[in-house]
Structure formats: structure tokens, C-alpha cells
């Protein structure tokens, strides 16, 4: 992997994130630290509600500036269903991955943390 560090050092470590979300507000589920790049590999979203159909949005607040770009919009999940995304994408320093779900959901994700500090 290319190393953007001027010192020539850096690490790549597999990590996970998880979030137990209740209600329907916007939630920050992953915030990228300074001098890091996160390659998100998998996101698993499970609906815990008894509602016939739930929906969620997944978005990136780039650079933490308050402007979000939706990467998944109004995705539906059946009662107690599970959604899995294996689409790989990069988050850079200051980016915030956010979830808005219509009901109670569990979120589990896996990513590669590239540390250039």
C-alpha cells in the first residue's frame, strides 16, 4: 500500500466498529482520526424492531464539516432482517460515517486503519 507519510513509516491494522442504535436520529458511528485513512470493508446492519419494514441511510460527513454525502439512501430491511455491504470505500482524516435508521438497529463494521502519524 502506498504510504503518504513523509517519514516513510506507517501501519495497517484491521479493526472493527459497532453501534447499538435506538430510535431514529442521526448517529455518528465512525470518526477518522488525524493522520489516518480508514478503508471500510464490510458493514452489517441488523434491524431489531418488530415493524414490518425498516429503512436506513448511510452517509459520510466529509472532513467533519457538516455536509454529508449519502452512500446508501432509504435502504429497506424486513422485520429482524440483516443488510450486508461489502463495497469498499475510503474515509480520510476528519470524515464521519453516519447512520440514520427508522427503528432500532445494530451496526457492525470492519475496516483497515492506515496510520501515518
Image: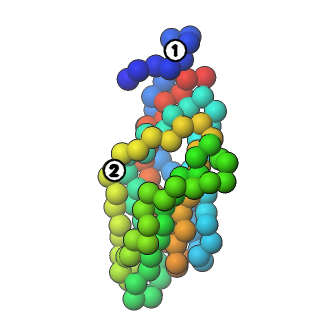
Q: Earlier in the sequence, mark 1 or mark 2?
A: 1
Residue at 32% from the left image edge and 52% from the top image edge: 86
State the SS at label 1: loop
Question: Mark 2, residues whose alpha carbon is within 10 Å: few (<14), some, or many (≥20)?
Answer: few
Q: Which of marks 1 and 2 is in front?
A: 2
Residue, disc 1 = 9
Q: Residue 55 carries which label?
A: none
Label 1 Cα crowd, 10 Å radius (few <14 / some 14-19 / many 20+): few
The secondary structure type at the circle numbered 2 is loop
Horizontal and vertical percent position of residue 82: 35, 70
Horizontal relation, residue 77 to residue 7: left or right: left
Residue 75 lies, with reference to residue 114, above or below; the image says below
Q: Which of 98 and 108 is in front in this view?
A: 98
User: Number of marks in the image?
Assistant: 2
The reply to whether residue 29 is in sight is: no
Residue at image point 47% right, 82% down: 49
Q: Which of 22 and 74 is in front in this view?
A: 74
Note whether residue 76 is visible: yes
Relative height, residue 17 to residue 51 (above, below): above
Mark pair 1, 2: CA separation: 28 Å
Q: In which quarter of the image is the C terminus?
A: top right
Residue under label 2, please give it.
Answer: 87
* x and y, in percent, of residue 87 in the image: 33, 50
Farthest residue to the right: give it: 65
Q: Residue 21, position in %: x, y?
A: 57, 69
Task: Please identify the quarter of the rendering in which residue 67 is found.
Answer: bottom right
Q: Measuring 46% from the left and 19% from the top, which residue is drawn there? A: 3
Q: How is the image coloured?
A: rainbow
- The image position of residue 89, as x and y in percent, is 41, 44
Amino acid at each position: 500500500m502506498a504510504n503518504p507519510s513523509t517519514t516513510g513509516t506507517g501501519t495497517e491494522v484491521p479493526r472493527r466498529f459497532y453501534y447499538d442504535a435506538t430510535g431514529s436520529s442521526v448517529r455518528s458511528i465512525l470518526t477518522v482520526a488525524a493522520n489516518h485513512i480508514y478503508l471500510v470493508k464490510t458493514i452489517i446492519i441488523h434491524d431489531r424492531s418488530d415493524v414490518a419494514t425498516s429503512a436506513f441511510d448511510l452517509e459520510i460527513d466529509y472532513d467533519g464539516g457538516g455536509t454529508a454525502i449519502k452512500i446508501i439512501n432509504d435502504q429497506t430491511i424486513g422485520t429482524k432482517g440483516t443488510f450486508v455491504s461489502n463495497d469498499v470505500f475510503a474515509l480520510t482524516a476528519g470524515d464521519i460515517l453516519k447512520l440514520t435508521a427508522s427503528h432500532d438497529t445494530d451496526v457492525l463494521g470492519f475496516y483497515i486503519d492506515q496510520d501515518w502519524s
